[in-house]
Amino acid sequence: MKLAVVLACFVVFCLAEKPLPCTSPPLLTGRLTVMSQNEKIGIFGKYLYDAVGQRVRLFEMGSFNNQTFTADVLLHFTEAAMYEIDDAKRTCKKSPLKADFQPLKIPQDAFRISQSVVGTSSVPGQGLLVNNWSGKLPDKSGDFLTTVTELGCFPVKSIYQTKEFGWVLADFYDNVIGITNPNLLEPPEFCAGAAIDVEEEPRDYLSFYANEDRVQSPSIEQSLLNLWNAFKDHH
């Protein structure tokens, strides 16, 4: 009888210790870098994430071939629209958004690869416990590998497959719960008259950044260096 009780306690302990699929906080502000395998994508900037209203705003800046640029994009999934915003010129372009909203979460059918420590566990306060997951993308178009924190399910890193750009790597950091200015998740007033061009091909944010009309980088390494320098100059 005692053995049965001990075994039962052991089973309960194991179940309690096993990390489960989780969902990130519904409102987040932070920074991210995004790079693609084919080197067409190199993004360094700030993001605002609203899972309740299904909206994401991206402020991105960088420098390619000694040319600096900025981009301000609002992805409004409930409207299936993408707004390209220029506050300085007070212009706004509204394009059809082809992607469905994907919340920051670990799907229930994902497989936990491992649990690890970013940094070190040898010194208190110098390590971050994270869980590494793998699985299929929601549209089954490819695989993904995602790392989230054990406490809070904050995104740390995600690698996923795309047909157009190959593997795409996204790193998240400086994550903060909440959004200090909710108005940034609404189109500015000068976007009120913007209309979607029904003949324009729907795009997602990756295809926007890979637009050949934009300045392109010679390499991922140089892109990151230029992006980092531009970011420091603006902050």
Image (cartoon, rainbow, N blue to C red):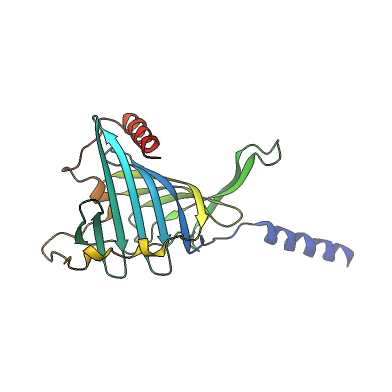
Q: Residue furthest right?
A: 2
Above or below 120: residue 150: below
- Which one is nearer the viewer's eye here, 179 or 116? 179
Quarter containing the C terminus:
top left
Q: Height in image: 22 above or below 41?
A: below
Instruction: Measuring from the top left, give residue 34's x and y in whole percent.
Output: 37, 44
Q: For residue 195, which quarter of the picture? A: bottom left
Q: In which quarter of the image is residue 43?
A: top left
Identify which residue is drawn at 31% across, 70% down.
78
Q: Quadrant of the N terminus?
A: bottom right
The spot of residue 229 in percent (x, y) is 36, 32
Which residue sits at x=78%, y=65%? 8
Left or right position of 26 against 141:
right
Please give left or right for residue 114 compared with residue 17 in the image. Answer: left
At 41% from the left and 64% from the top, the residue drawn is: 182
Residue 197 lies left or right of residue 228; in this view the side is: left
Q: Which of 16 and 49 is in front in this view?
A: 49
* Residue displayed at 55% across by 56% down: 153
